[in-house]
Image (spheres, coloured by chain):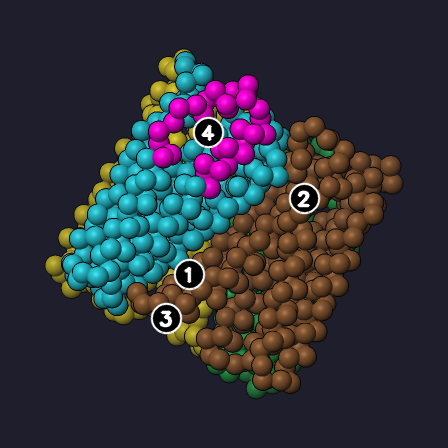
Chain colours: A yellow, B green, C brown, D cyan
Amino acid sequence: MGAGRLEAFSDAVMAVIMTLLAFELAAPDGPTREAIYASLSSLFLYVLCFVFIAIYWNNHHQLLRVTDRISGAVMWANMTLLFSLSLIPVATEWVGNAYQEDFDPGPAVAFLGIVFLAAAISFTWLARALLRANGPDSQLARALQHSLKEPVSIGLYTLGVVTAIALNTSSSHVGVYVSYACYATVSIIWLIPDRRLTRHDEHGEHAR
Amino acid sequence: MGAGRLEAFSDAVMAVIMTLLAFELAAPDGPTREAIYASLSSLFLYVLCFVFIAIYWNNHHQLLRVTDRISGAVMWANMTLLFSLSLIPVATEWVGNAYQEDFDPGPAVAFLGIVFLAAAISFTWLARALLRANGPDSQLARALQHSLKEPVSIGLYTLGVVTAIALNTSSSHVGVYVSYACYATVSIIWLIPDRRLTRHDEHGEHAR
Amino acid sequence: MGAGRLEAFSDAVMAVIMTLLAFELAAPDGPTREAIYASLSSLFLYVLCFVFIAIYWNNHHQLLRVTDRISGAVMWANMTLLFSLSLIPVATEWVGNAYQEDFDPGPAVAFLGIVFLAAAISFTWLARALLRANGPDSQLARALQHSLKEPVSIGLYTLGVVTAIALNTSSSHVGVYVSYACYATVSIIWLIPDRRLTRHDEHGEHAR
Amino acid sequence: MGAGRLEAFSDAVMAVIMTLLAFELAAPDGPTREAIYASLSSLFLYVLCFVFIAIYWNNHHQLLRVTDRISGAVMWANMTLLFSLSLIPVATEWVGNAYQEDFDPGPAVAFLGIVFLAAAISFTWLARALLRANGPDSQLARALQHSLKEPVSIGLYTLGVVTAIALNTSSSHVGVYVSYACYATVSIIWLIPDRRLTRHDEHGEHAR
């Protein structure tokens, strides 16, 4: 029952963020192909963010599943993670504004990357705080050794942010597409099941 | 406790979708009969979607109640189901736009059907993933044999999508009404209690 | 664990309705007394609806606390209750529109009463369905005997609806104030702790 | 299982309030520095309110963790707390309106302080009600002795409200900044871990 309420609260926040992102989607303003195309770019952005939050939910779940005790630091690391995730709707709204009102999407896409980066760093902090609360001999400690995903993600998000801002000077949108590619690549990396936390129970309950 | 957090997260997402659908309802813009009639069509659409989500909640509940273990595939099948359901508000908004701004509702009603279809397919995938995780001798495996509801639903949704798009060429709204009839028929089929998952405990806790 | 998921889902729906009602409140449009007064009527309506939902949450909690088993009928009675509650935001929006755009609030206040009535009837249905599922010798059965609150509530809500509609012919707002008084009276009746469900554990956990 | 549903409901309400606050944030209306600066003040307000609610969630969690039984008074004290918290979005919207439409933010900032004050008083009431329900010998009773944080918080919030209103006569915004400083100071006081409720389990699960 230790981490139960922390999980329940995080679940509720992530569920509401996901649903509000979908709610923010603007319905096409007509039955024509053009109206539908205009809505498709926001749908693509929604898919990207949905997958992003789904991965965090999954990793959060796997992390807390092998946790015996939590601390004040865990509570605040978790709140920072939720705060970062809660900024996703305003970031996507900014990106959407850029396409709708036809201004440079660079800063908005960079901000989206900063939000993703903040979430990644908070998650790393959460894992460390859980590790400190549970001790070096815990099941969690063994599971968290030797991971490359976190540094690679943080590197790719940083690259995406830099590219989106560097584009600001030019008039082409190449930088923004490179940023999207960086963000999407991180999601793909994480969609590959995380062996670290599932290795210890080989026959059965992967990712439970 | 295995599937507990998956259930809690799904509950939260479905609850928020339901409530946002109700929140989206436009209140009548006056005390007259005409103002009330203008709001009634969106109320009808809300009832249709509320019942749709209530049925999914119920089936989801029945499915996970007899589940012992979950897997990564179960997690992603469930996320796909939630993603499909999260598109219902934007679909109903599109349909509402069509009636309010008086453009052809065909593509919007077809999109609603595609969303319903995606949810139905995800649910079938979820059931299969749970079956694979729990083995052919599980209580779930016995319960899921010989079901006709899934293929009939998928057929009716497909028919509804095709009808709504075929209408696109004509100027009458007959195709859209046929689509509504298809979607409503599927809901009625599912409102009949699902014997498969309740058969094993005859005296008492049906649908628990 | 029987009714656990039903409770969790109902909690989430009621929590989101409450919060959306507060979110719907229009902030004053200036620092003046007039701007604040204009917002006060919607605040009053919010308090009325918040208390209404809080009472339902409390009664729902007390009812399910003494429940051993649930059925399909319980599930659908509960969904009908949640559907009724989910219409509160659109009803208050209609009432708010009436005051803001200065049209006759009669039909809107009557609709609010119909929503309250629908919730009251669903709750009675829910209690009956739970009784049927738990048998005449259950703790619940003894607790539910001889209650006057339900019929009195249903009577007062009906009176409120009739008064709000009867006002429609006159140009004064007296009928609407009588309706508000009826709705508020029901809430006051329910704020008096429900002895029926707490009688059986005298020393300690009332209303738990 | 006693306080379980009370916790679950409170979690859901607090999670939705937090997420709606973030949803309310207006995205910058362009890629320029000015557009970003215009959004920064609402982001600052969001951070203040997020931390405020996070502290309440944490304290609520610590309080109910050492609770054995709840009562009707506890239920209503908790509802009053949730009601107070639910007014935060409309208060921040009013403050935001003041900056956007350039009117005196004094009354709005005072209202925000009144909402914070109402939450603080409700929380004190909740703690007292829990104490009465659990008896003078309970773990909770020992934990709640000799606290200075509550009276200091209530004093600082009152000071903030008075300062924001006193500013109303002058044309400078000094009073409002003093109010913000008061509100932020209370948050900082509470960010220091609450020793009272964690003292009894020294080796391990602080703040759990």
For the residues carrying marks 4 and 2, which lies nearer the camera in this image?
2
Circle 3 SS class: helix
What's the residue at 39%, 69% (across, down)?
A: A37
Give the residue furthest to the left: A169
Same chain, marks 3 and 2?
Answer: yes
Question: Could you tell whether A133 is left or right of C174 in the image?
Answer: left
Span shown in magenta = D122-151
Circle 2 SS class: loop
Which chain does tag 3 point to? C
For the residues carrying marks 1 and 4, which lies nearer the camera in this image?
4
Check residue C34 in the rendering and tell me which mark sits there, or answer none: 3
Label 4 vs label 3: CA separation? 42 Å
Check residue A103 in the rendering and tell me which mark sits there, or answer none: none
Q: Residues within 10 Å of mark 4 (few under 14, many from 20)?
A: some
Is the C-beta separation of discs 3 and 2 under 8 Å? no
Which chain does tag 1 point to? A
Mark 1 lies on residue:
A24
Up-down relation of residue A95 to residue C168 (above or below): above
Mark 2 lies on residue:
C193
